[in-house]
Image (cartoon, rainbow, N blue to C red):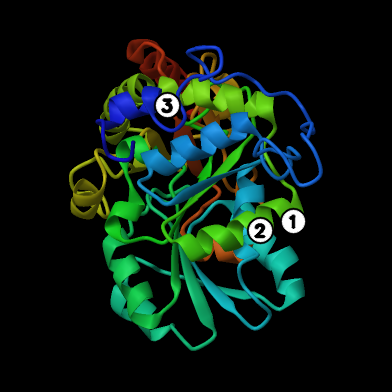
Amino acid sequence: MLNKYKIESALIHGGIYGDQQTGAVNVPIYQTSTFEQRGLGQNTGWEYSRTGNPTRAALEALIAELEHGKAGFAFSSGMAAIAAVLSLFHSGDRVIISSNVYGGTFRVLDKIFKNFGISYSIEDTTDLAALEQKLTPEVKAILVESPANPLLTVTDLKAIAGIAKKYGILSIVDNTFMTPYLQRPIELGVDIVLHSATKYLGGHSDLVAGLAVVNDEELAQRLAFIQNATGGVLGPFDSFLLIRGIKTLGVRLDRHVENAEKAAEHLQNHRAVKKVYYPGLPGAQGFEINKRQAKNGGAMVSFELYEKYNIKRFFSSLKLIALAESLGGVESLVCHPASMTHASIPYEVRQKVGITDGLIRLSIGIENISDLLMDLDQAIAESEAR
């Protein structure tokens, strides 16, 4: 069914739709660990749910179609998906990561994979000429987010894919912030796409999941082996919930983005706000590049208040917007990256890349925008030094 329907229809009807045996519109939850075999060496195509489960398979087919890839893989968390992809590399290999990525990505490279001889370097992937100079023979992949977490930095994904192909290495994009509804990196030449499906794809803050999509049959075989061998697979019930969440992704993101654009403009014009990070604002870093490769600027907004405003009082004064980890749910969330999502990154590294102690990250939900702006305004007012 690949590319047969527009994205809005593919979200609902893509992948494996319904159940052929019963005619059920929704893929059933095959809540089983194992499958009875007809005889020795004779099975129905299913043997053991770590290796494959029909509900998970439906989800994997869906995300592969949405991202226009060859194969999809569902994992128990976004970090499990990242760890599986990093397991494609060997001792002595190096991975370049963009200068602001999710703290968990940094942590797993810095604390886990370096024990196996896989190294990393943090580079400004927006500076393509400088990046190319960093591609020593040890470098086997470039892993980027665009827009990146939490400064919403935009990287030219088509250019990154081209550089990777030139040097015979892999290009990997974490597409969590944008989802295939807003941006499809494989169409731009990228090899592997990652998602923390906990976020917008699930959309309701009620599951934890990770997805990976590859655009090459050989990569698909290697990642399938890693998925089965290491076993961090997504269970049937969460696979079902994720399929259900994806069905409403389009209508949800339309409202998320509508609200985010208004929130970004409001904050940009607010006397208390020193800087706003949102790639949908004209004049923002990467605005033109993002316009070429994505539908819009997404629904994440980061900003900094002037020094006379007490950031702790701002967080404690919010009434509608919840202070919490994660993002992408229907409810608006706020976090302090330096002490929450990016706390695992050393202070000096955070300062170097611009993740200051005054940075505030907003995941704009689908509430009434007037209520959201009123909550931000009253919290900012409460935080002003008296």
Indicate which disc, 3 or 1, sits on the residue closer to the N terminus: 1
Badge 1 amino acid: Ala
Badge 3 amino acid: Ile
x 65%, y 65%: residue: 87
- Asked if residue 276 lies left or right of residue 83, the reply is left
Indicate which disc, 3 or 2, sits on the residue closer to the N terminus: 2
**Mark 1 crowd level (few <14, some 14–19, many ≥20, 10 Å Cα):** few
What is the x, y in percent for residue 23?
A: 50, 12
- Asked if residue 263 lies left or right of residue 346, the reply is left
Q: Mark 3 or 2, which is nearer the eye?
A: 2
x 49%, y 22%: residue: 245
Asked if marks 2 and 1 touch (Cβ < 8 Å), the reply is yes
Q: Which residue is mark 3?
A: 364
Q: How many marks?
A: 3
x 62%, y 22%: residue: 206
- Label 3 vs label 1: CA separation? 38 Å
- Between 178 and 164, the one lying in front of the other is 164
Does residue 165 lie above or below 286 as drawn? below
- Between 58 and 113, the one lying in front of the other is 58
Query: Which numbered marker is on residue 225?
Result: 2
Q: Mark 3 or 1, which is nearer the eye?
A: 1
Quadrant hosting residue 241: top right
Q: Tell me the element at label 3.
A: loop
Q: Is residue 308 visible?
A: no
Asked if marks 3 and 1 touch (Cβ < 8 Å), the reply is no
- Label 2 vs label 1: CA separation? 6 Å
Does residue 91 lie above or below 60 as drawn? below
Does residue 48 lie above or below 86 as drawn? above
Q: Which residue is mark 1?
A: 229
Q: Tell me the element at label 1.
A: helix
